[in-house]
Amino acid sequence: MRGDGRHILLVLLDGAADRPASELDGKTPLEAAETPALDRLVAAGISGVTDIGPPGMPMPSDRAHGRLFGYDPDAIPRRGVLEARGLGIEVSETDVTCSASFARLGSSAHPSGAITDRSLSGSREQCRNDAEAIGAFETDSVSVSFEYTWKNRGILTLESEAPLDPGVTDTDPFESGLPVVRPEPTANADNSDAAARTADALAAYTRWSVEQLSDAASDIVLSKWAGMPTQPEPFAERHGMEAVSLTPKPVLAGLTDTLGMDVIDPPEGYDERAAVVRETLDTAKFVHAHYPEPDEVAHAGTPLEKKRELEAIDRSLSGVVKAALDRDLVTIVTADHTTPSAGNVVHSGEAVPVTIAAPTARTDDVTSTGERNAVAGGIGRIDGIDVLRIARSLGDRVLLDGLRRTPSGGTVPTTDVCPLLEEDQS
Ligand SMILES: [Zn+2]
């Protein structure tokens, strides 16, 4: 078996999976949506559902993508590092980097400093000014710096000659009405002394930010997802494909960049974006076409609005689907998690639908897109970390189990082997 198999396209509809909605006659937005382009892929492929993480576990996009790309999420830097990289902020090997945001604290109505507004949608313009007041802080041996990025957000970096450790609790509980969380070392921190140093510095900075912002539009800088760089195996080595990621989301750009993919910030319009996907298919062996909108609409809108957004994406994809089928690509369509468009959970842990279309697929009887339609398909129910290997197999890109062509092993049918006889001749 040689290494040159079919190219793979991953159409990732972020948070597209959902729950039944009464306003959609008990269907989910994906089930209710008219999606002729995606339906063509479903008819040409195999479908099923996938637990992106452990069954029932709500997954954030970065860790979910890590598993869909075939990685243990713990081998990938935590989100603070990914966001910073995706926003073009350099991350050093020894610093701890957190995602940060301005927030409002309550007063008399919310004793104990509870958080009353985490988004500051009414005063985002002022956040840039507020950033000047909380940009640089020193405590003991640790320097803390805040870099404003967008909306009410920024990146917080802790730097020290002494070791730091990102195993600390988030000061941001990710929910309004709760108090600001005191930073503490987590039970599984790699270096508990270093984590205690990091937590103390974060606590001092966070208290200082409250003093500094006493007359500002915001009241505090919250932080979460502290991380340090790790060195995951590059995607091209793990899967034998040079990859391109088309994503407008900084955290995903940071992730795919960390895995060694070429990252393209795609145009905003769906038709323009589809044109870029088609162009990219000409050259890249693996294309990640990421659509964050279904998730965003689910967080801000209604099931009906999410259904319409999915239909708009589908309309733009007809040319991409035709190209994928004409060129005998392996095309994966899935979501990274379930985002309920009703209720107030962030994400939920239900399995998501997955379709893999390929000329080699033993097609099933599923012909239309949707969570419950997919259950009847040939894929059955699988672990998210296996999706890409199944797609690679349909693309003739997986080495026979048990063969050892290289010392490092792996599943790529590489032809780049160390020759015995040529070595003897030289
Ligand atoms: Zn989301």
Image (cartoon, grey):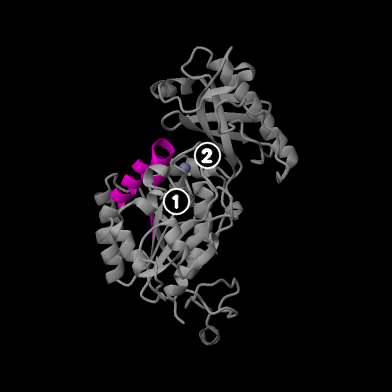
Secondary structure under the numbered disc 2 in the rendered image: loop
Q: Residue at x 35, y 66 (%)?
A: 367
Q: Secondary structure at mark 1?
A: loop
The residue closer to the viewer here, 267 or 27, is 27
Left or right of 3 in this view: 226:
right
Residue type beneath disc 1: Ala
Is 40 located above or below residue 345 in the figure? below
Amino acid type, mark 2: Val
So how many labels did they put on this image? 2
Does 288 lie within the magenta span? Answer: yes
Residue 92 falls in which quadrant of the image? Answer: top right
The residue range painted magenta reads 286-313
Please tell me which of labels 2 and 1 falls first in the chain.
Answer: 1
Q: Is residue 118 above or below residue 98?
A: above
Q: Which residue is mark 2?
A: 345
Q: Is residue 246 visible?
A: no
Rounded to the nearest whole Å, what is the CA distance between mark 2 and mark 1?
14 Å
Q: Is residue 237 above or below residue 140?
A: below
Q: Residues within 10 Å of mark 2 (few under 14, many from 20)?
A: few
Residue drawn where x is 59% and y is 57% of the image: 72
Q: Which residue is located at x 41 percent, y 55 percent?
A: 12
For disc 1, the marked residue is: 17
Where is residue 42 drawn, in percent x and y?
36, 65
